[in-house]
């Protein structure tokens, strides 16, 4: 491992850590602790769609079920601790919850932006605390939210905010940049705070495509990314800083709580140019994934629990509607511009103790590759081989949560634990 220093701006130097090129393989045999979720189990385990998962500092796991419009809290032994929220439009009720964050002491934040127009906050005993309204421009959050690592009454966003652009006049990002965002929740209204600025690929602008003779446009909302554009993956770190990846290269950037650059973690893994063959294969992969999602969520009948009545209902989406949705998706994907390179990094998550899990692209450039485990101070601990699932949530004592779906569309949440030597 070699260390260099790079002047990001005239007054600030940041460390460049060149990590080894050779992979050190780790054992992905995580020990299962418990599993919850079954149509034959108790009512609280009959999940509709678990959309997000998080741990508190005691190791309890929180499951956001968007069909049941509730958060189910499970203790360390797999037993029901409590449920939070219910369907509705009143205080403490959920209309269309999409993201979940849980603090060390068990306080809960649920993003219910599209319809409720707020972030809902709950105390550590599950009681509703208050709502924090979002601005009129915000349409939704595309990504994940995490508690601020510095203990602020705020969440850190990994992904992007989708807004009505004409309502953000004067708040636009400078050309070639996108904000790494902290959302402050200590007032009546959400306040966007820019932790630092990341690199941004060129904007696609308004996308227009045709389906069955009808012209469709993305209109005035935040432009979508190009095919193969690198995502903005952000994870909070102890002390309030963040780790993030923003480019096609393998360059994991660390900044402190004030946004000052600390170091960049690199490996000699390089983005590959996009070819016609790669593009065709990627579009086919995305369409196959989209069709499979449509099938699992509605293309075939699936028994779910109606969160409003508590009854089991059979939900399905008409085959013709599903086929029409896939055709529309194809037209949309074919209308998107294409980036020049296939990015190396596909995902990034962080743990409570500051470890950084980085999902790389597979050797075929289309599949998930290995997961590297790094530390915030610049050490490479090893890599889990391709085929290892990225945990949906990281808890204390090496707890990991995975959302799994069986061939019948029934979801379960499996909690596993890292071996003791992997937690050191």
Image (spheres, grey):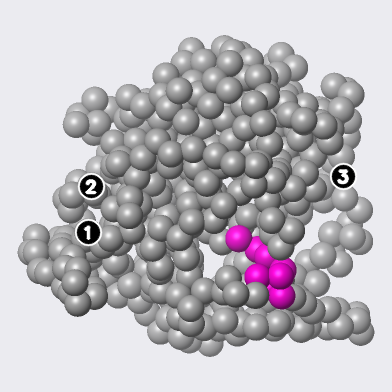
Q: Quadrant of residue 110?
A: top right
Q: CA distance from mark 1 to mark 3?
A: 50 Å
Residue 252 shows which numbered tag? none
- Upstream in sequence: badge 1 or badge 3: 1
Q: Is residue 107 left or right of residue 21?
A: right
Work out which quarter of the rendered image holds the C terminus and state it.
top left
Q: Quadrant of residue 336?
A: bottom right
Asked if residue 162 can be seen in this view, the reply is: yes
Q: Position of residue 201 (x, y in %)?
A: 48, 79
Q: Is residue 9 left or right of residue 301?
A: left
- Upstream in sequence: badge 2 or badge 3: 3
- Position of 19 relative to 24 (above/below): below
Q: Nearer the viewer, mark 1 or mark 3?
A: 1
Residue at coordinates 85% horizontally, 22% vertically from top-left? 310
- Upstream in sequence: badge 1 or badge 2: 1
Classify mark 2: residues with Cα within 10 Å, few (<14), some (14-19) or many (20+): some
Work out which quarter of the rendered image holds the N terminus and state it.
bottom left
Label 3 sits on a secondary structure element that is loop
Q: Position of residue 103 (x, y in %)?
A: 47, 31
Residue 375 shows which numbered tag? 2
Label 1 sits on a secondary structure element that is strand
Query: Mark 1 sits on what residue?
Result: 262
Residue at coordinates 19% horizontally, 68% vertically from top-left? 12
Residue at coordinates 75% horizontally, 51% vertically from top-left? 114
Is 164 covered by the magenta stretch?
yes
Label 2 sits on a secondary structure element that is strand
- Position of 135 relative to 73 (above/below): below
Query: Mark 3 sits on what residue?
Result: 316
Q: CA distance from mark 1 to mark 2?
A: 13 Å
Q: Which residues are magenta?
A: 161-168
Q: Nearer the viewer, residue 40 or 205?
A: 205
Residue at coordinates 58% horizontally, 71% vertically from top-left? 171
């Amino acid at each position: 491992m070699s260390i260099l220093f790079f002047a990001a701006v005239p007054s600030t130097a940041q460390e460049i850590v060149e990590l080894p090129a050779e992979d050190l393989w780790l054992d992905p045999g995580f020990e299962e602790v418990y599993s919850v979720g079954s149509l034959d189990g108790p009512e609280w385990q009959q999940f509709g769609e678990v959309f997000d998962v998080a741990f508190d500092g005691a190791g309890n796991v929180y499951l956001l079920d968007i069909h049941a419009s509730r958060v189910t809290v499970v203790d360390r032994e797999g037993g029901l601790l409590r449920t939070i929220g219910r369907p509705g439009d009143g205080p403490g009720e959920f209309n269309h919850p999409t993201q979940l964050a849980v603090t060390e002491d068990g306080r809960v934040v649920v993003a219910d932006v599209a319809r409720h127009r707020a972030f809902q906050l709950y105390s550590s005993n599950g009681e509703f605390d208050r709502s924090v309204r979002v601005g009129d421009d915000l349409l939704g959050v595309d990504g994940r939210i995490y508690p601020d690592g510095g203990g602020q009454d705020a969440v850190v966003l990994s992904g992007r905010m989708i807004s009505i652009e004409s309502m953000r006049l004067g708040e636009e990002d400078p050309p070639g940049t996108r904000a790494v965002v902290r959302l402050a929740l200590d007032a009546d209204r959400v306040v966007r705070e820019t932790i630092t600025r990341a690199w941004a690929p060129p904007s696609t602008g308004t996308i227009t495509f045709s389906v069955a003779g009808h012209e469709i446009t993305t209109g005035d909302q935040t432009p979508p990314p190009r095919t193969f554009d690198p995502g903005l993956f952000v994870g909070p770190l102890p002390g309030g800083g963040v780790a993030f990846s923003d480019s096609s290269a393998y360059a994991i950037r660390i900044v402190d709580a004030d946004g000052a650059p600390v170091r960049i973690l690199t490996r000699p893994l390089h983005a590959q140019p996009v070819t016609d063959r790669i593009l065709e294969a990627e579009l086919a992969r995305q369409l196959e994934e989209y069709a499979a999602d449509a099938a699992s969520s509605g293309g075939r009948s699936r028994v779910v629990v109606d969160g409003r009545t508590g009854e089991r209902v059979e939900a399905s989406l008409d085959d013709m509607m599903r086929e029409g949705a896939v055709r529309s998706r194809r037209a949309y994907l074919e209308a998107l511009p294409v980036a020049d390179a296939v990015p190396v990094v596909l995902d990034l998550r962080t743990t409570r103790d500051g470890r950084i899990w980085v999902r790389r692209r597979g050797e075929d450039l289309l599949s998930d590759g290995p997961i590297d485990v790094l530390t915030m101070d610049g050490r490479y601990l090893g890599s889990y081989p391709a085929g290892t699932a990225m945990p949906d949530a990281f808890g204390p004592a090496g707890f990991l949560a995975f959302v799994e779906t069986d061939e019948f569309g029934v979801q379960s949440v499996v909690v596993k634990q890292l071996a003791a030597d992997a937690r050191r």
